[in-house]
């Protein structure tokens, strides 16, 4: 989470324009790759993304979850994903 906060700060300190987008949703189930992550219960999900100079972007996704993770040896109650990348545009391609 600290990494995303630092990335947002780096993008916002630039003199160039920054676009941000936030989403919030309530869903009947959190299913990923045909597996329920919320035990067939409702899920509240949120994401925030920022795009800065040269089409670099950072963001995060958060959702409640409910399943046992045998590798972590505990019960999972939320999923938090972080993203960072660069968008490429090819105007000359047809």
Image (spheres, grey):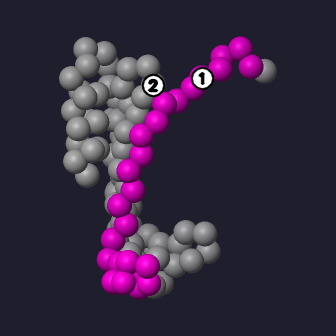
Q: Secondary structure at mark 2?
A: helix
Circles 1 and 2: CB atoms closer than 8 Å:
yes
Magenta residues, start to end: 66-93
- Please give the residue where the numbered disc 1 appears in the rendered image: 89
Residue at x-position 71% and y-position 14%: 92
Q: Position of residue 36 (x, y in %)?
A: 52, 78
Vertical position of residue 78 compared to residue 55: above or below: below
Q: Decide whether residue 69 is among the magenta residues.
A: yes
In depth, the one of 94 and 5 nearer the eye is 5
Q: Position of residue 24 (x, y in %)?
A: 35, 56
Numbered circle sitting on residue 33: none
Q: Position of residue 40 (x, y in %)?
A: 48, 84
Residue at the right extreme of this rendering: 94
Residue at x-position 37% and y-position 39%: 58
Q: What whole-number distance in Å separates the C-alpha atoms at marks 1 and 2?
A: 9 Å
- Please give the residue where the numbered disc 2 appears in the rendered image: 55
Decide if residue 41 is in sight here: no
First in residue order: circle 1 vs circle 2: 2
Helix, strand or loop for the magenta stretch, by majority: strand
Q: Decide whether residue 73 is among the magenta residues.
A: yes
What crowding class fits label 2: few (fewer than 14 Cα within 10 Å), some (14-19), or many (20 or more)?
few
12 left or right of 24 in image:
left
Residue at x-position 35% and y-position 61%: 80
């Amino acid at each position: 989470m600290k990494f995303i906060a630092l990335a947002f700060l780096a993008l916002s300190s630039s003199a160039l324009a920054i676009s941000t987008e936030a989403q919030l949703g309530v869903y009947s189930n959190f299913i990923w790759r045909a597996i329920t992550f919320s035990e067939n219960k409702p899920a509240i999900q949120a994401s925030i993304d920022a795009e800065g100079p040269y089409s670099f972007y950072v963001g995060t996704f958060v959702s409640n979850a409910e399943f046992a993770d045998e590798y972590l040896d505990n019960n999972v109650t939320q999923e938090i994903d972080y993203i960072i990348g660069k968008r490429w545009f090819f105007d000359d391609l047809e």
